[in-house]
Image (cartoon, rainbow, N blue to C red):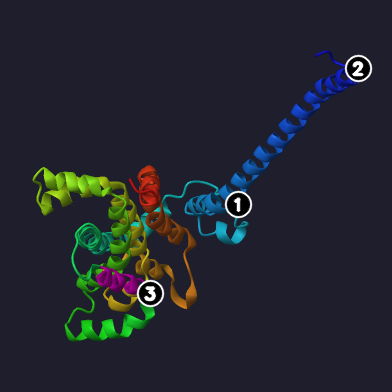
């Protein structure tokens, strides 16, 4: 079919306008990338900026906080602040007390939560849905409501001012969310694998340890990290149940850096805060990839 002059003119106009269309699309793509980059920079300033400011402030001398603006860089690296925080401020003891209270609680939470999640989702028995609803109801219980009853119970059982008060409380409040999340992860396991293990002669314990648990490993790491942050940053329970100086956790220990008449030694305080914050941040960065996999593990089945 021969092209008419009109068709030839339209084809020529299309060829001429095509580079302009490409340039317009390239400009729009560039603007989108710049907008995304700007959003990332803003988020970094909001999220990372305070951490950088906290770290730099931990190296300032006390006189710099009054004679210079808050955002000014430190004149030098004053390591005396960390020495004061560890020795004079007794932050090392508080750090150890937190570990002795958090890690046993975390171990109990993960062991019981893993077993309960498997029993509620993989095993078939009457009333399992009702039991799961009971655990879900535990998530909705406000912490402030149970403080007085718990204090009364611990007082009569002589558990006030002991690590057991924290371990029992941490375990009790950590289990509902852990059981719910682990049940979700176990639900994502294909039932064909469980059935194949049963056909091969595996008992319930072998299915639990060798088949189901390895498949929810990333989810278990995610739950462990979430619970660790909750327990490590606890202030309310520690402040309520612990009164001895030698048993205080790191969050309540930071309150000791407030002197008489509300006076605060800002250098050692920032140094102690860095010692409390940055280990948990490093732990998250190390386990970041497994946490991301764990967060998406229960979204797809199979």
Q: Mark 3: few, some, or many residues within 10 Å (few <14, many ≥20)?
A: few
SS for dot 2 = helix
Is residue 73 in view from this perspective?
A: no
Locate residue 189, reporting x and y percent: 28, 49
Give the residue at x 32% y 51%: 188
Locate residue 27, reporting x and y percent: 74, 33
Observer-side mark, 1 or 2, equals 2
Q: Name the side, left or right, on which 288 lies relative to 263.
A: left
Q: Which mark is residue 140?
A: 3
Q: Mark 1: few, some, or many residues within 10 Å (few <14, many ≥20)?
A: few
Observer-side mark, 2 or 3, equals 2
Is residue 231 in view from this perspective?
A: yes
Classify 166 as above or below 24. below
Label 2 to label 3, Cα distance in Å? Answer: 76 Å
- Relative depth, front residue between 155 and 183: 183
Give the residue at x 28% y 77%: 241
Residue assigned mark 1: 72
SS for dot 3 = loop
- Relative depth, front residue between 214 and 99: 214
Q: Name the side, left or right, on which 278 lies relative to 155.
A: right
Label 3 to label 1, Cα distance in Å? Answer: 44 Å
Residue assigned mark 2: 5
> Looking at the image, which residue sits at the far top?
2
Q: Which residues are magenta?
A: 129-141
Q: Name the side, left or right, on which 253 lies relative to 154.
A: right
Quadrant (top left/top right/bottom left/bottom right) for the N terminus: top right
Observer-side mark, 3 or 1, equals 3
Give the residue at x 25% y 86%: 152
């Amino acid at each position: 079919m021969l092209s008419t002059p009109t068709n030839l003119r339209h084809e020529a106009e299309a060829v001429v306008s095509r580079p302009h269309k490409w340039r317009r699309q390239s400009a729009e793509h560039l603007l989108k990338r710049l907008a995304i980059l700007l959003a990332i920079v803003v988020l970094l300033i909001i999220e990372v900026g305070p951490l950088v400011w906290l770290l730099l402030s931990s190296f300032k001398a006390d006189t710099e906080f009054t004679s210079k603006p808050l955002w000014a860089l430190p004149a030098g690296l004053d390591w005396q602040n960390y020495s004061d925080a560890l020795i004079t401020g007794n932050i090392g003891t508080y750090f150890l007390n937190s570990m002795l209270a958090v890690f046993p609680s975390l171990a109990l939470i993960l062991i019981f939560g893993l077993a309960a999640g498997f029993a509620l989702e993989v095993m078939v028995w009457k009333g399992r849905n009702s039991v799961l609803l009971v655990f879900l109801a535990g998530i909705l219980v406000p912490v402030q409501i149970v403080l007085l009853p718990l204090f009364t119970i611990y007082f009569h059982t002589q558990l006030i001012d002991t690590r057991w008060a924290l371990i029992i409380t941490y375990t009790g409040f950590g289990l509902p969310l852990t059981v719910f999340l682990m049940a979700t992860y176990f639900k994502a396991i294909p039932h064909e694998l469980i059935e194949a293990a049963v056909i091969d002669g595996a008992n319930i314990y072998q299915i639990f340890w060798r088949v189901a648990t390895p498949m929810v490993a990333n989810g278990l790491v995610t739950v462990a990290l979430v619970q660790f942050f909750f327990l490590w940053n606890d202030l309310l329970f520690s402040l309520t149940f612990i009164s001895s100086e030698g048993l205080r956790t790191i969050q309540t220990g930071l309150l000791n850096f407030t002197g008489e008449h509300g006076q605060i030694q800002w250098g050692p305080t920032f140094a102690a805060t860095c010692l409390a914050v940055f280990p948990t941040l490093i732990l998250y960065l190390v386990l970041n990839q497994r946490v991301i996999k764990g967060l998406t593990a229960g979204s797809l089945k199979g």
